[in-house]
């Protein structure tokens, strides 16, 4: 039932509310004290949370003699919570453009400064956050310079295909890929036409273990060896410099 508990929490129930609702479905009809003992919480805690469940339409109450009894509503009532979450999300999404403009008025001068702005990331999660930035802040293309075989040890092929590529295609972002030739990268190049991608192989040189991503107004540099870490630099001059270096290598690549 752990899976059910986690799902109820995703619908907006607290852990105690979820435990009480599950317990009440099993007990059918009981008192608050008996339910509290059944699920292992204090009576006053159970009372407070049962009131919340009543407001959410998941519990009703009745009397048996002079005693208050509580009854679980059918699980189908949970669909109302799903609809509420959908409506809240739709409202949040609809309000976002206006809120974004208000927030941008407070940060316009800060982010337009010529001083570079650095961010530091660690671990596999950090790698994914950096890659997500290239999707969020690219204008029309992403330039990608990498020892791809090493990079995929952190940012897996599966994650790339199931997350990065679908979002990039939806945003119509061209990926220019500069990589060392290998069995993996040769197979990737064969599928360029399917994935809005142009792959070229770097000329012979000493292999490196970093990945550089150039997009929008940023440059990201990632280290594919432990401990994994990455930095992003938000600055137009840095961005232009790395673009120029990328284009020199691109002109010499196959």
Image: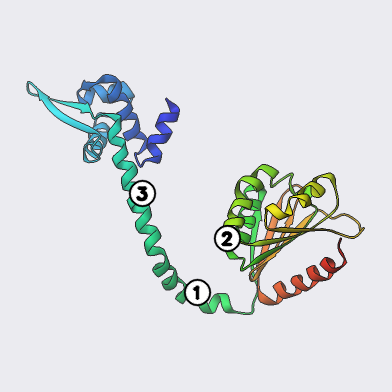
Q: Looking at the rendering, in which quadrant would you find the N terminus?
A: top left
Of circles 1 and 2, the one toward us is 2
Q: How would you rate the neighbour count of disc 1 (Cα within 10 Å): few for under 14, some for 14-19, many for 20 or more? A: few
Using the numbered discs, state the Cα–Cα distance from disc 1 to disc 2 in whole angstroms.
Answer: 25 Å
Q: In this view, does 24 lie above or below 194?
A: above
Q: How would you rate the neighbour count of disc 2 (Cα within 10 Å): few for under 14, some for 14-19, many for 20 or more? A: some
Residue at image coords 34%, 29%: 19
Q: Is mark 2 on a helix, strand or loop?
A: loop
Q: Earlier in the sequence, mark 3 or mark 2?
A: 3
In which quadrant of the rendered view does residue 93 lie? bottom left
State whether residue 41 appears in this view: no
Q: Is mark 3 on a helix, strand or loop?
A: helix
Of circles 3 and 1, the one toward us is 3
State whether residue 54 appears in this view: yes
Q: Looking at the rendering, in which quadrant would you find the C terminus?
A: bottom right
Please identify the residue farthest to the left as the structure is shown: 65
Residue at image coords 67%, 76%: 236
Residue receiving disc 1: 107
Q: Which of marks 3 and 1 is nearer the N terminus?
A: 3
Q: Is residue 196 above or below residue 6?
A: below
Q: Residue 171 — which label?
A: 2
Q: How would you rate the neighbour count of disc 3 (Cα within 10 Å): few for under 14, some for 14-19, many for 20 or more? A: few
Query: Percent position (x, y) of residue 58?
Result: 25, 34
In which quadrant of the rendered view does residue 206 lie? bottom right
Q: Residue 86 — which label?
A: 3
């Amino acid at each position: 039932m752990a899976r059910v508990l986690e799902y109820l929490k995703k619908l907006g129930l607290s852990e105690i509310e979820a435990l009480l609702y599950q317990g009440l479905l099993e007990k059918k009809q009981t008192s608050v004290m008996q339910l509290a003992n059944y699920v292992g919480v204090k009576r006053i805690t159970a009372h407070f949370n049962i009131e919340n469940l009543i407001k959410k339409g998941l519990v009703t109450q009745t009397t048996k003699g002079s005693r208050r009894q509580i009854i679980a509503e059918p699980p189908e009532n949970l669909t109302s919570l799903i609809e509420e979450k959908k409506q809240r999300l739709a409202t949040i999404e609809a309000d976002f453009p206006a809120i974004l403009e208000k927030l941008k008025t407070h940060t316009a001068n800060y982010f337009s400064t010529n001083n570079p702005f650095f961010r530091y990331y660690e671990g596999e999660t950090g790698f994914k956050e950096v890659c997500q930035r290239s999707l969020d802040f690219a204008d029309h293309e992403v330039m990608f310079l990498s020892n791809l075989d090493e990079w995929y040890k952190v940012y897996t092929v599966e994650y790339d295909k199931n997350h990065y590529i679908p979002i990039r295609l939806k945003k119509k972002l061209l990926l220019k890929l500069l990589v060392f030739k290998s069995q993996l990268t040769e197979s990737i190049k064969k599928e360029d036409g399917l994935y809005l991608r142009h792959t070229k192989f770097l000329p012979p040189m000493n292999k490196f273990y970093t990945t550089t991503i150039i997009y929008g107004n940023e440059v990201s540099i990632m280290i594919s060896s432990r401990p994994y870490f990455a930095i992003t630099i938000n600055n137009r001059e840095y961005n232009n410099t790395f673009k120029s270096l990328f284009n020199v290598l691109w002109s010499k690549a196959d």
